[in-house]
């Protein structure tokens, strides 16, 4: 019997249009990819036309590579102390959600937000209010709150904070969680050690996070454990031991979830590093070297 393995992939560029993403995924041998559906530092993007959507669907069918997630623009911050930023964030989130719906992309990944000098509870309450104001996501689209490294007072750094966010939002069925391995490590979860991994799972169980995880970002980390500094690195070249990736890729409850790389694109060729990183993950899955 064939052992179930997670669908693997990477975040890819959409230079040339959203329809170019599946082919970029095919070039690196990905099963799934994640994209920004527009410029990631702008509030709004050019509206998607019917032709864009048709080309996107054709390319998805032709390549067999599906776009599993749209990562929201970084400007969106529902926890901001500025009301204008919160309002613009809601419009931008609506724009992202409608793009996901038009393209048939199931997940929308969002960083919960940052509340600056204000206490975390204030930030969490603002995010909850934003999500309640937003209401339901379009049919077939689930918002995934991503855990963070805790850099710059970003919220969602612990399982406890993720639970508070989900609870405050009223845990609607269309809000769930995306976990990022580098952010876990940087925020203080020692996932490289068996004990640290077990502690994380225990926290996830007790806070009810485990059944709400829909996707993983598999990234190594350039910065140290607990540093709260968010710096992604290629698999095997950073501070996270290979054993951590083996646990993520094979853990019951996770091993059928999409696993997407967000590692730097610093090779000569756009695809070179993704190919290398996916090979490293497959080697770990096959029981090969676990690196450092
Ligand atoms: Zn992210
Ligand atoms: Zn991430």
Image: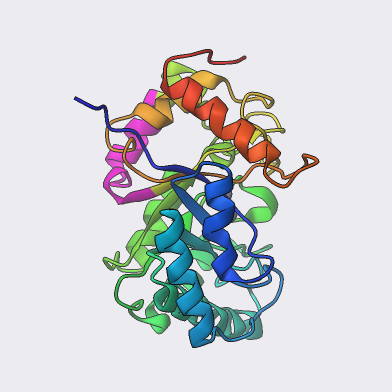
Of residues 204 and 239, the one nearer the viewer is 239
Q: Is residue 35 visible?
A: no
Residue 201 pos. (x, y %): 35, 32
Residue 61 position, x and y percent, is 40, 62
Q: Which residue: 57% across, 85% down?
A: 87
Answer with left or right where residue 5 lies relative to residue 223.
left
Q: Is 62 drawn above or below residue 172 in the view shown?
A: above
Q: Is residue 125 left or right of residue 47?
A: left
Q: Main secondary structure of the magenta part?
A: helix
Q: Is residue 40 above or below residue 218?
A: below
Q: Is residue 179 magenta?
A: no
- Most distant residue in the right direction: 268
Magenta region, residue range: 198-214
State whether residue 222 is above or below residue 33.
Answer: above
Q: Place residue 198 in its image quadrant.
A: top left
Is residue 88 visible to us here? yes
Query: What residue is shown at x 62% (from left), y 71% (from top)?
Result: 17
Q: Quadrant of the N terminus?
A: top left
Q: Which of 214/157 is in front?
A: 214
Residue at 71% in and 43% down: 264
Q: Verify whether residue 212 appears in magenta.
A: yes
Q: Is 222 left or right of 144, judged from the image as shown?
A: right
Quadrant assignment for the C terminus: top right
Which percent across, then down, holds residue 192?
52, 21
- Tell me which residue sits at (28%, 40%) in the image: 206
Q: Where does residue 105 sit, x and y in percent of width and height? A: 41, 66
């Amino acid at each position: 019997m064939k052992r179930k393995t997670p669908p693997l992939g990477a975040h890819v560029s959409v230079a040339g249009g959203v329809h170019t993403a599946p082919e970029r995924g095919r070039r690196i041998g990905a099963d799934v990819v994640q994209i920004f559906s527009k410029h990631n530092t702008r509030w709004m993007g050019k509206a998607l036309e019917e032709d864009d959507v048709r080309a996107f669907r054709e390319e998805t069918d032709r390549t067999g590579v599906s776009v599993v997630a749209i990562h929201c623009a970084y400007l969106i911050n529902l926890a901001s102390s500025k009301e204008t930023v919160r309002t613009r964030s809601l419009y931008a989130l609506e724009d992202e959600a409608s793009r996901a719906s038009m393209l048939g992309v199931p997940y929308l990944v969002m960083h919960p937000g940052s509340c600056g000098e204000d206490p975390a509870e204030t930030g969490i309450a603002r995010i909850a209010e934003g999500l309640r104001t937003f209401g339901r996501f379009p049919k077939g689209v689930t918002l995934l709150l991503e855990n963070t490294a805790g850099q710059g007072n970003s919220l969602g750094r612990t399982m406890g904070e993720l639970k508070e966010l989900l609870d405050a939002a009223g845990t609607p069925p269309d809000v769930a969680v995306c976990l990022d391995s580098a952010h876990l490590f940087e925020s203080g979860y020692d996932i490289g050690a068996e004990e640290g991994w077990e502690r994380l799972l225990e926290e996830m169980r007790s806070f009810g996070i485990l059944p709400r995880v829909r996707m993983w970002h598999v990234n190594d980390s350039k910065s140290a454990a607990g540093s709260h500094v968010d710096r992604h690195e290629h698999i095997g070249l950073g501070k996270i031991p290979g054993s951590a990736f083996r646990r993520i890729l094979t853990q019951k409850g996770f091993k059928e979830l999409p696993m997407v790389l967000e590692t730097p694109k610093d090779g000569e060729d756009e695809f070179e590093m993704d190919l290398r990183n996916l090979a490293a993950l497959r080697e770990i899955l096959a029981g090969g070297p676990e690196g450092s």
